[in-house]
Amino acid sequence: MKRPAFDDIFMHLASDLAGRSHCVKARVGAVLTKDTRIISIGYNGPPAGTHNCDEEWPEHGCARDSKGSCSLALHAEENAILYAAKNGASLEGSSLYVTLSPCLPCARLIYASGIKKVQFLNSYAEYKGLSSDEGVDFLRKFGVEVTKYVAEEVINE
């Protein structure tokens, strides 16, 4: 019997967490790890205790900001990082598994948090129709290892 790799386990968990999102537009999950242990998890959506977009605005989701993004949502990476910080966990040298590659603002937060490795399942640039993954480019420029996750088995999206 083949034992699953930790990369597979963590990306599967990130994919499962994405299903918890209340976002009407996109569902994204994230898992922060260090030394094969989970530090924190997150998924995208408005801050806890505020709104559930799929319940309040099921047809179109929350209002859009000037760039066409959700005006209320925290990204999955932000939620995972904020929860870890709130609970005093050090992220220095940690790894992030996320179902959508980081946008540029999340990339800055990832870098500033000391995260050293990021694996993503799908491209933010492809999702948004952009020419490049600015967040990925930023992280690589400043020494963060970023790779597109390739599974041996298909993960449901």
Image: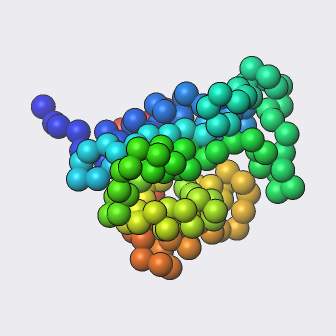
Q: 108 or 133: nearer the eye?
A: 108
Is residue 72 rendered to the left or right of residue 64? left
Q: 87 or 152: nearer the eye?
A: 87
Question: Can you say whether 139 is above or below 39 in the image?
Answer: below
Instruction: Report if residue 118 is visible in the image.
Output: yes
Residue 102 rendering spot, x and y as whole percentages: 57, 57
Is residue 106 rendered to the left or right of residue 50? left
Name which quarter of the figure residue 94 lies in. bottom left
Residue 34 rendering spot, x and y as whole percentages: 29, 53
Instruction: Report if residue 80 is visible in the image.
Output: no
Question: Can you say whether 82 is above or below 50 in the image?
Answer: below
The residue sitting at the left extreme is 1
In the picture, which quadrant includes the N terminus? top left
Residue found at x 44% / y 40% = 41
Q: 94 or 58: nearer the eye?
A: 94
Question: Can you say whether 119 is above or below 37 in the image?
Answer: below
In the picture, which quadrant includes the C terminus? top right
Name which quarter of the figure residue 48 lies in. top right
Residue found at x 46% / y 63% = 113
**Colouring convention used in this rendered image of the protein:** rainbow
Residue 150 rendering spot, x and y as whole percentages: 39, 51
Residue found at x 48% / y 33% = 17
Residue found at x 23% / y 53% = 35
Number of marks present in the image shown:
0
Residue 2 rendering spot, x and y as whole percentages: 16, 36
Is residue 93 rendered to the left or right of residue 99? left
The residue sitting at the top extreme is 55
